[in-house]
Amino acid sequence: MAVLQTTYTDQVAPGYAGMVANAETSNRITRTNEGVAAVAFGAAAFRGTGDHGMTVTPTAGGFLGIVIAHEALGLLAGATADAFPQYASVPILTLGVIWVNVAVAVTKGDQAYVTSAGAITNVSTSNVILPGFYFDTTSAGAALVKLAKR
């Protein structure tokens, strides 16, 4: 029999980008990815041009929520791993706690923003606010943290 795995880490990772962090009350919606690029798990989602569309292009007042990971999403040839392709139905968390990757050090309680490149940060200058979303954990630099809207 072939050996699939021979080494193991001491600790399992606490989460991954787009993973709903706990069983607190949450709200989830879906929208269609209007962009030509794949939408990564844990990305900030904004209103698209269509009635049911979404995009990751930051727009003031257009924030919908954070893209939820889908572990059963099949990877097609040429597709991007851990991302929803164009025209896919994308699940979005509008209320609750979710894991995201941050670009800089953040402190629990900091307001969340997104840069024009889509990076989630706590820096307000020239960035779009993610209304009601605050960091629920602290990081010393770029890292995986919890983001919450309660």
Image (spheres, rainbow, N blue to C red):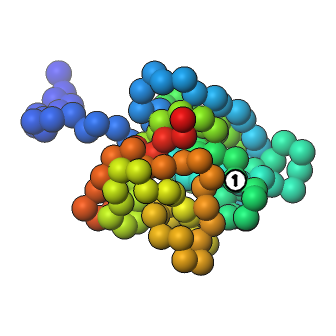
Tell me: 7 left or right of 90: left
Q: Is residue 3 visible in this depiction of the protein?
A: yes
Tell me: 1 left or right of 138: left
Measured as percent of width and height from the top left, residue 24 is found at 48, 24
Name the amino acid type tagged 1: Phe
In the foreground, 95 or 117: 95
Residue farthest to the bottom, as pictured? 126
Measured as percent of width and height from the top left, residue 91 is found at 64, 36
Measured as percent of width and height from the top left, residue 30 is found at 72, 35
Q: Which quadrant of the rendered structure holds the N terminus?
A: top left
Does 45 appear above or below 126?
above
Structural crowding at the residue carrying mark 1, measured as other residues with C-alpha within 10 Å and reported as few (<14), some (14–19) or many (≥20): many
Q: Is residue 79 visible in this depiction of the protein?
A: no
In the foreground, 75 or 35: 35
Quarter occupied by residue 9: top left
Residue in view at x 63 percent, y 52 percent: 131
Does 110 appear above or below 147?
below
- How many labels sit on residues? 1
Does 129 appear above or below 51?
below
Disc 1, SS: strand
Quarter occupied by residue 150: top right
Residue in view at x 36 percent, y 50 percent: 108
Tell me: 87 left or right of 149: right
Residue in view at x 59 percent, y 78 percent: 126
Residue farthest to the front, as pictured? 109
Q: Which residue is mark 1?
A: 63
Residue in view at x 65 percent, y 31 percent: 28
Tell me: 77 left or right of 14: right
